[in-house]
Amino acid sequence: MAGEKAASEKKPGEKAASEKKPGKKKPGEKKPAEQQAGQKEVGDKKKKVKKHHASRNPVLARGIGRYSRSAMYARKALYKRKYTAPETKIEKKKKEKPRATITKPVGGDKNGGSRVVKIRKMPRYYPTEDVPRKLLSHGKKPFCQHKRRLRASITPGTVLILLTGRHRGKRVVFLKQLATGLLLVTGPLVINRVPLRRAHQKFVIATSTKVDISGVKIPKHLTDAYFKKKRLRKPKHQEGEIFDTEKEKYEITEQRKSDQKAVDSQILARIKKVPQLRGYLRSTFCLSNGVYPHKLVF
Amino acid sequence: VFKRFVEIGRVAFISFGPHAGKLVAIVDVIDQNRALVDGPCSGVRRQAMPFKCMQLTDFVLKFPHSARQKCVRLAWEKENINAKWAATRWAKKIEAREKKAKMTDFDRYKVMKAKKMRNRIIKHEMKKLQKMASKKGKKPEKSEKPEKPGKVQKSQKVQKAQKAQK
């Protein structure tokens, strides 16, 4: 409208002025060379809304200005400034109203055939406290925010002795600690049939034997989510077939095999360098008469 | 019946206390229970020590009673007690015990493998000789021979195991 015309009038005028005199107020779209020469205006250049003029109505006494309404209208040049933008928003909103009711068919005779049903109904119950007030607690963090610790004796490449699980007693190479704090560990598979697996720090003895794993690259997709046990839960209410749908037998995916190969090939090379280490990893740990764990140096 | 006596210059091994494991020379006797003791070459200051914590060794030094540390040191170094001590079976046993306690899990595995190999070799030789003996009838000479080759190999294996431990 008029305001837009005025704004567009300003632009060519400004551009003309700036071409002649660098140093005056310029729009930000201008070439950087000219900008650098002169001073820049802060904010958007298309609408000079940001720069506010001081009051054009001098104060005679508190609450009484020098000029009348009509005089101020002229002084502020409101005949030029007529904004129409807000109206379009209202028009848009009027069009976008979602459906409030829906007509549904109804069975039975003498019922009228259909009913008008509200789509969004009012709540049938308001609790006395909208959000029930929780008791004050301090420092109680969820599991994902817990601090993960690692024993100083466990460093990448350490040989660990697993104490629990189906691989108890086996000696295994430690790779890294995962985000949940569990240790990523591998046999290697060809040595003692322990695949890439997670182990718990507490149920592991760290020996002082270390394999140099400095250059080994462990794929980044080996995270806790990769190792997490998957359980199918599809209650289809078919009694008798419930146990079949869930994974009874664990199947080794091809990805696991390829990951295992990728990691193990790097580690096996380093294991071969240390004499007798391969046989050591193949053996299992056990106690016998006269062997006391508290007296052993691991 | 008693071969080692408490005398001036007797070198003793301290079995317990703050200076456990060190050698000292008895410089003087204070009373029935204590002696003035000095170990210049083993890091024990001249002090009184009860007899109970001392165990007498076979070594005796020659110096007069209440001789100063310098004299004790001279006598000690002249006799070269440190080297002699290290050569005794007593000291070797102590060392072996210490090494065994320090063995890591990997070392234990290596020792186990070495022992196994050694025992196999010995058994193998024994069987060979037994066979020979049984074939040729009863001859008492044969029973003496198997020990010697076995022992030679034993010492080699033991050395290997000790090196692995280190």
Image (cartoon, rainbow, N blue to C red):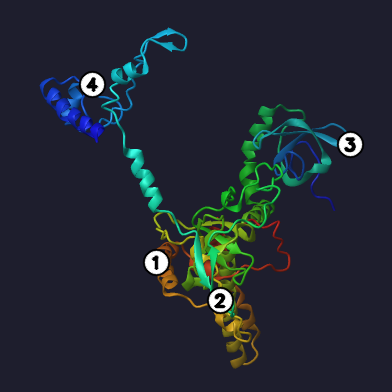
Tell me the number on the disc at residue B121.
2
Give the mark nearest the N terminus, 1 or 4.
4
Q: CA distance from mark 1 to mark 4?
A: 61 Å
Q: Are marks 1 and 2 on the same chain?
A: no
Q: Amino acid at mark 4?
A: Gln
Tell me the number on the disc at residue B32.
3
For mark 3, does the 10 Å Cα neighbourhood hold few (<14), some (14 to 19), or many (20 or more) residues? few
Q: Are marks 1 and 4 on the same chain?
A: yes
Report x, y in % for residue B158: 58, 64
Q: Are marks 3 and 2 on the same chain?
A: yes
Q: CA distance from mark 4 to mark 3?
A: 103 Å
Name the chain letter of the residue that bears numbered label 1: A
Is label 4 in contact with label 3 (beta carbons under 8 Å)? no
One can see residue A243 in this view = yes
For mark 2, does the 10 Å Cα neighbourhood hold few (<14), some (14 to 19), or many (20 or more) residues? some
Q: CA distance from mark 1 to mark 2?
A: 41 Å
Give the mark nearest the N terminus, 3 or 2.
3
Residue drawn 48% across and 76% down?
A252
